[in-house]
Image: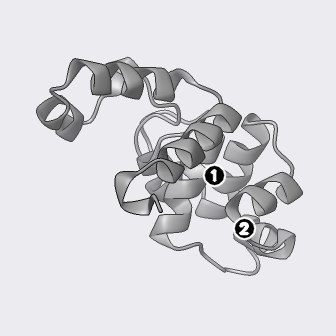
Amino acid sequence: MPGRTPSVNLSTRIRTARLRAGLSQADVAVRLGVSRAAVSNWESSAVRVRPSSQRLEEIALLTGVAWEWLATGRGPASPSGEHIAAVDAEWVEDPIERRMLQAFRAASGEVKQALLLMAEATRPDRRG
């Protein structure tokens, strides 16, 4: 996987992230609620269809790659404890939240997606 220099193009990074996570285009489509054709278009350099920033964030979470790498090609592809963003160091003061963040970052793409769905479903503002 790429290191610190910009890596190829966005379509190639999306495909690389998907394959690295062991997901098919259909898997990604189902989990993101889009068509398989949309995923195929994102991965095609000929089509030049780009996912939104929010979709890129969802793809990064699903595949377990760093958002900055996926979106720009800069930085490490895999988030690790050695590359904690400055904002994390400043804002994550709660020890439980920090442990959750570390565990989340170490989880597979599938586990991350399941945890995200569970966390969103239990948010106080979404309860009936």
Residue drawn at point x = 20 percent, y = 31 percent: 92
Up-down relation of residue 30 to residue 99 (above or below): below
Where residue 25 appears, x then y in whole percent? 84, 57
Q: Is residue 63 left or right of residue 91?
A: right
Up-down relation of residue 36 to residue 26 (above or below): below
Where residue 23 appears, x then y in whole percent? 81, 44
Q: Is residue 56 left or right of residue 102?
A: right
Where residue 117 appears, x then y in whole percent? 58, 48
Amino acid at pointer 2: Gly
Q: Nearer the viewer, residue 125 or 23?
A: 125
Residue drawn at point x = 53 percent, y = 22 percent: 106
Q: Nearer the viewer, residue 111 or 78?
A: 111
The label number, if any, that marks residue 33 in the structure image? 2
Q: How is the image coloured?
A: one colour
Q: CA distance from mark 1 to mark 2?
A: 20 Å
Q: Mark 1 Cα within 10 Å, few/some/many (few <14, many 20+)?
A: many
Amino acid at pointer 1: Arg
Q: Is residue 68 left or right of residue 118?
A: left
